[in-house]
Image: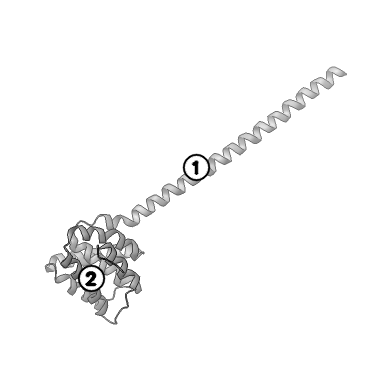
Amino acid sequence: MPFLIAILGVMGAAAFWWYRMKAMNDAAREVADVVGRVQGNIRRKKLRKQAALSPLTAIDDPVVAAATLITSIVSEDGPILPQREAVIRAVISEIADKKKTDEAVIYAKWAAAQVDDTTVVIDKLAPFLRERLDVAERNDLLQMVNRAAQGGEKRLEISDQRILRLRQKLGFEVN
């Protein structure tokens, strides 16, 4: 009888440890799954951010950059209607020929629609423009933004924060 109790005790201990190892294995698998999901979420967020910025990072022409910047700021209050687009075309045509103006405005409308946040557009394109434009041209750009906002169906009130951020990113002193 003591031999039988000893065998049952060993079998009970083996079953207990087998159950504990199985539970630890399940817990380790769950931790690995959570870590994998977190890493996947981080990668997807990074890819979404890169994809959102890709229309802006592809810009290598100051005219297209200016058109995109103006279009993004003006479209912050709503969609670009035909009269507003005509004003943007008129403003851009002051610095480019007709073909270049058409290309710049078409790309600007598409890029502004792809990137929802005007702050991101300013943060990406203003330093690019600061490097390629002199002080007088940067002042002209600010005036172009104001003219584009004032023309069209109704006058737009551009946020002071947007103008201050644009001025700062263009390299002007901001009080």
Cα separation between marks 2 and 1 = 47 Å
Task: Check the image and report above or below for 59 versus 20.
Answer: below
Residue 98 place in picture, x, y as percent: 12, 69
Check the image and tell me how it is coloured. Answer: one colour
Q: Residue furthest top?
A: 3
Q: Residue at x 30, y 70 (%)?
A: 163
Which residue is disc 1 drawn over? 36
Quick check: 48 left or right of 90? Answer: right
Location of the N terminus (image quadrant): top right
Residue 111 place in picture, x, y as percent: 28, 62
Category of crowding for the residue at label 2, using alpha-carbon neighbours closer than 10 angstroms: few (below 14), some (14–19), many (at least 20) = some
Q: Residue furthest left?
A: 97
Task: Check the image and report above or below for 87 versus 61.
Answer: below
Residue 127 place in picture, x, y as percent: 25, 58
Q: Residue at x 54, y 39 (%)?
A: 32
Which residue is disc 2 drawn over? 142
Image quadrant in which you'd find residue 25? top right
Category of crowding for the residue at label 1, using alpha-carbon neighbours closer than 10 angstroms: few (below 14), some (14–19), many (at least 20) = few
Q: Residue furthest front?
A: 175
Q: Amino acid at mark 1?
A: Gly
Image quadrant in which you'd find residue 139? bottom left
Location of the C terminus (image quadrant): bottom left
Give the mark toward the camera: 2 or 1: 2
Q: Amino acid at mark 2?
A: Leu
Q: Earlier in the sequence, mark 2 or mark 1?
A: 1
Quick check: 12 left or right of 113? Answer: right
Is residue 78 shown to the viewer in this render?
A: no
Residue 78 place in picture, x, y as percent: 34, 74
Q: Residue at x 20, y 57 (%)?
A: 131
